[in-house]
Image (spheres, rainbow, N blue to C red):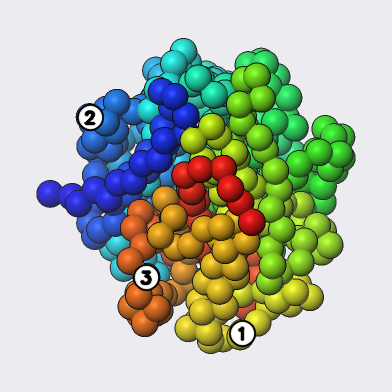
Amino acid sequence: MHNIETSVCSLGRNASLHCLTVNGRGAPPDGGILRRAAAASGAAIVQHYIFSDRARRARLPVPAAEGGDAPEVRIEHLPGEGGGMFAVQAIAAGGAKNIRPVKAGGMTIGLCYEDDCARYCRLGSVADADSNAARPDQARKVFDTMKKALDRNGFDFTRTVRTWFYNDRITEWYEDFNRVRNGFFEETGVFAGTVPASTGIGAGNTRGAALVGNLFAIQPKNGLVKVRAVASPLQDSALKYKSSFSRAIELEYPSGRLLMISGTASIDKRGLTRHAGNASAQIELTMEVAAALLKSRGMGWENALRGIAYFKSAAGPGLFNEYCRKNHLALRNIACAFTDMCRDDLLFEIELDAFAAGLSGA
């Protein structure tokens, strides 16, 4: 029997956001378990992650090319570090209407849907079908596929508020990836508006591709949702060292504010890694950076909805749990994954979503 952690927030009239997370050992649960749990709350899954050992992937069903389910984003733990652990996390939308699949190459790569506040597009597991192509070419193909999918469904790419990129062997080609992303953002006018929040992690995937990408875009109805980039009090803009993402994006809904914090690691104001080789110290600084971002928007850890904690070694979760115990943090809905970071000397990273009811922000 799997323990499903859940959280929910109300975005507005007939609109809500749900998160469901399962961490455990052995084979990941069938996606139907989370789907049924979401449906019991009147919500539909719109984003679905599975993190597991490579040895476990053969036991997972192949995602269907047809149908309206959210695509499963299947990411592999670093070899030898997962220890048989898995994490499954789903984001579900309550009050979602007109849900329809987004397809590319005969595969469902996402969903479009709407509620009373906005139209949405979520894309997942976008990759180049040619896994033998050069890595920068694969990256460009991912961005082009995302843009074409958005175009076909009435979204401009500049409506993108959040991205996730899982680069196989990330440290070997992260600079090349950033050059591709920067060029694409220039072409599509992203830098003239709000640059999305993002996560960039080093991990393999079940498709053998150099890159798997996910995207979340929003098209507010009648100004009911306001989108703004949020600066980090303890870190400088990532744009200054040619990594094109905002530290956080805030969506202001009629019922409150949703803060989406980018993948955050032990990096100081100058853009330098702190505490190389010391996982405990990196966890502490990273959590301080995230806490400062929350505080800057009138929030605290109690407002956290979901997160994914990325560890470079199997010892990481124990150190993270010890930090939480010492600081009296009872965090829920945190999926654990074992991956590389965008720098060899980074040992921990966390992404986080939080919600505060009401419209006041610092």
Residue at (47, 44) in percent of width and height: 357
On the image, the x and y values in percent for residue 94 come to 38, 28
Q: First in sequence: mark 1 or mark 3?
A: 1
Q: Nearer the viewer, residue 347 or 253?
A: 253
Residue at (56, 74) in percent of width and height: 288
* Secondary structure category for the residue under label 2: helix
Work out whether 293 lies above or below 5: below
168 relative to 181 in the view: left or right? left
Residue at (62, 61) in percent of width and height: 296
Give the mark count: 3
Hey, which quadrant is residue 59 in on the image? top left
* Secondary structure category for the residue under label 1: loop
Name the kind of residue labelled 1 in the image: Ala
Name the kind of residue labelled 3 in the image: Leu
Name the kind of residue labelled 2 in the image: Ala
Mark 3 or 2, closer to the camera: 3
> How many C-alpha atoms fall within 10 Å of the one at disc 1: few (<14), some, or many (≥20)?
few
- Residue indicated by mark 3: 329
On residue 276, which mark appears? 1
Q: Nearer the viewer, residue 33 or 292?
A: 292
Outermost residue, top side? 98
On residue 40, which mark appears? 2
Q: Report, in whole angstroms, how far the alpha carbon at label 3 lies from the one at label 2.
A: 28 Å
Check contact, mark 1 vs mark 3: CB within 8 A: no
Q: First in sequence: mark 1 or mark 2?
A: 2
